[in-house]
């Protein structure tokens, strides 16, 4: 396992103990207590007495002699410093040795009130970015079974986290993570089965953690297949594309539909996870506003069958399916036989995973049908897409931005 930690530490008990020992020794000298080997300490100045007090942390009283004379309370104070200062120094040396010999165990043993994030992908980056804007000092442990060194350094230096390499489904690692003390566990890994397996094992070990456990599932079909399971009812499960699609429909499309007089035409160019969730949100939030939904995708027939299989969509609008690449003119020619894009203000969402193709197609569509409301998707925030969109009347949407702007506050600890 590789483990690194970044970020400042709070002042620990040892600093307070050291200050107390120093003050006790100084008070003893100031009260009139002398030393068998330094009888002149009574008449020495304050700086000399302070120097002797600090010396107790290095050599104890071996070269100073034993306390003698003076009031009883002063001798007791000095004797406490005589024993406390060397013990404190010895404990600090032992702790330093433990840090060098077993840094992983030492750092994990001190975890308390921390957040555990499983996975080191872009979703983890988004979560950490939002978390640090709201809570800059909460301890965070990022766990993954494999992570490149450069990525590890990026997480450590950018967000001040501890990085731990290991399989989160192993019971030993779950115990090392001090789950009982954690304020939140975010399972954001790329392997959905591993994520749900880890959640199951965590709840079997710590049943009381259900309200602190959040799971991300990449595959909508897999998540929906398990929606009636006990696990899904006990913890919070989400999909990033659901967040993005909900924000797009709620904040952009519904207001557009309400302003248009006639029922609207919506073209979903790209029907992967994002396109499917946009259509689901349209069905839920814009019922009665949509006349037709046209779906374009290279694998459109199969994906529409999968959606229908899950019975996620209601009726109330006409649906047309066009199988093909959104960059192929033939697909748009077929669409134009069914839909007149020059009438009204059709909504076109270019939502494939290819940001360059989305932007190129959006520009072509805008030149031919300037009346259309066109959204072009990128995964990360794209200054190019935003700038070009502003110049040509396009709406640039970033999955990352939509997810970050819709993360629930409760998930931030």
Image (spheres, grey):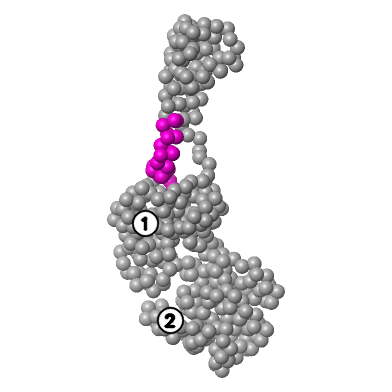
- Along the viewing direction, whichever of 42 and 58 lies nearer the viewer: 58
Mark on residue 303? Answer: 2
Prevailing SS of the magenta stretch: helix
Task: Name the residue that disc number 1 marks.
Answer: 167
**Could you tell me which secondary element the residue under label 2 belongs to?**
helix
Residue drawn at 43 percent across, 46 percent down: 113
Above or below: residue 109 compared with residue 63: below
Viewer-nearest residue: 292 or 42: 42
- Residue 298's label in the rendered image is none
Is residue 295 visible in the rendered structure shown here? no
Q: Residues within 10 Å of mark 1 (few under 14, many from 20)?
A: some
SS class, disc 1 = loop
Q: Which residue is drawn at 55% across and 83% down?
A: 326
Does the segment drawn in magenta span residue 98?
A: yes
Q: In this view, does 209 lie to the left or right of 392?
A: left
In this view, 381 is above or below 62: below
Q: Which residue lies furthest to the right in this view?
A: 391
First-in-chain label (1 vs 2): 1
Tag count in the figure? 2
Going 58% across and 10% down the picture, which residue do you hit? 44
Identify the residue at horizontal 59%, vertical 75% (top origin): 356
Q: Give the range drawn in magenta.
A: 92-115
Query: Is residue 38 covered in magenta?
Result: no
Mark 2 burial class by Cα count in 10 Å: few <14, some 14-19, many 20+: some
- Residue 42 pos. (x, y %): 55, 8
Classify 80 as above or below 141: above
Name the spot of residue 158 as percent of width and height, x first.
55, 52
């Amino acid at each position: 396992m590789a483990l690194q930690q970044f970020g400042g530490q709070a002042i620990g008990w040892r600093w307070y103990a050291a200050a107390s020992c120093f003050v006790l020794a100084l008070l003893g000298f100031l009260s009139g207590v002398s030393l068998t080997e330094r009888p002149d300490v009574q008449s020495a100045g304050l700086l000399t007495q302070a120097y002797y007090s600090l010396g107790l942390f290095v050599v104890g009283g071996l070269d100073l002699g034993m306390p003698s004379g003076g009031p009883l309370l002063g001798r007791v104070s000095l004797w406490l410093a005589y024993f406390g200062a060397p013990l404190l120094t010895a404990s600090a040396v032992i702790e330093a040795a433990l840090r060098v010999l077993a840094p992983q165990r030492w750092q994990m043993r001190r975890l308390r009130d921390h957040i555990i994030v499983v996975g080191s992908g872009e979703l983890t980056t988004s979560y950490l970015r939002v978390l640090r804007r709201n809570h800059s000092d909460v301890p965070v442990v990022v766990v993954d079974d494999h992570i490149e060194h450069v990525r590890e350094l990026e997480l450590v230096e950018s967000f001040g986290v501890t990085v731990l390499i290991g399989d989160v489904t192993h019971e030993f690692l779950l115990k090392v993570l001090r789950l009982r003390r954690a304020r939140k566990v975010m399972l954001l890994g790329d392997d959905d089965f591993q994520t749900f397996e880890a959640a199951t094992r965590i709840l079997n070990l710590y049943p009381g953690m259900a309200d602190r456990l959040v799971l991300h599932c990449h595959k909508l079909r897999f998540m929906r297949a398990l929606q009636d399971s006990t696990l899904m009812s006990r913890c919070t499960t989400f999909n990033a594309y659901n967040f993005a699609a909900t924000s797009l429909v709620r904040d952009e499309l519904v207001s557009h539909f309400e302003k248009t007089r006639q029922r609207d035409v919506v073209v979903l160019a790209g029907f992967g996870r994002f396109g499917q969730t946009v259509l689901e949100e349209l069905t839920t939030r814009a019922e009665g506003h949509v006349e037709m939904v046209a779906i374009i995708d290279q694998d459109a027939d199969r994906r529409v069958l999968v959606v229908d299989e899950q019975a996620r969509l209601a009726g109330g609008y006409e649906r047309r399916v066009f199988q093909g690449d959104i960059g192929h003119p033939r697909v748009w020619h077929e669409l134009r036989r069914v839909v007149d894009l020059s009438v009204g203000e059709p909504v076109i969402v270019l939502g494939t995973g290819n940001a360059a193709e989305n932007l190129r197609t959006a520009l072509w569509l805008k030149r031919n049908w300037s009346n259309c409301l066109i959204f072009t998707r990128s995964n990360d925030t794209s200054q190019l897409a935003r700038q070009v969109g502003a110049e040509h009347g396009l709406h640039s949407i970033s999955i990352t931005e939509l997810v970050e702007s819709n993360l629930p506050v409760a998930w931030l600890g």
